[in-house]
Image (tube, grey):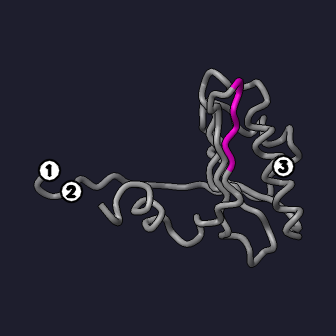
Amino acid sequence: MPGSGYDQWREHLPPYARTWDEWFVAEVDGVPAGALQSSDQALEQDQGWVRTLSVLPAYRRHGVGAALLRRAFTVYAAKGRRSAGLGVDLANPTSPATLYRSVGLGEVRWTDMCERVVPAAGV
């Protein structure tokens, strides 16, 4: 059926997530181990931006995340971007800040986020 499956998924991605040459999958012995998706949301700052970085638990702390980040940084540099960035939840139990610092990223600002859960009526 036209417009279903993969094609439909691609159509529903926001414009900033369609930088296809900045999506990477890492394999270990032929098995997908991690993925990185870039976003062009920081182009006005001449910056490459890591939107998501995911590594399967069995492959964490084995260099997969660092390899994905370095690959992304190489592509950003080849495109003439002056820097790279990402956002991180420091409460994440996988301690991603350690990985990010190991590849040369450093903190530039801290943001506190607040939220309130509001139950939907009739649920």
- Residue 27 covered by magenta stretch: yes
Q: Is most of the magenta stretch helix, strand or loop?
A: strand
3D distance between C-alphas at marks 3 and 1: 43 Å
Residue furthest to the top:
58
Q: Residue at x 84, y 49 (%)?
A: 105
Does residue 33 show up?
Answer: yes
Residue 58 magenta-drawn?
A: no
Which sits earlier in the primary sequence, circle 2 or circle 3?
3
Answer yes or no: do the residues labelled 3 and 1 have beta carbons within 8 Å? no
Image location (x, y in percent) of residue 37: 64, 53
Residue plotted at (69% across, 33% down): 27
Q: Mark 1 points at which residue?
A: 123
State the residue position of label 2.
Answer: 120
- Viewer-proximal residue among 4 and 104: 4
Q: Residue reaching furthest bottom? A: 44
Residue on which the image places disc 3: 105
Contact (Cβ within 8 Å) of mark 1 with mark 2: yes
Residue 69 drawn at (x, y percent): 78, 46
Viewer-nearest residue: 89 or 110: 89
The quadrant of the rendering that contains the N terminus is bottom left
Q: Position of residue 21 (x, y in %)?
A: 70, 60
Q: Give the range drawn in magenta.
A: 24-29
Indicate the secondary structure of the residue bearing disc 1: loop
State which quadrant residue 76 falls in.
bottom right
Helix, strand or loop at mark 2:
loop
Above-or-below relation of 75 to 79: above
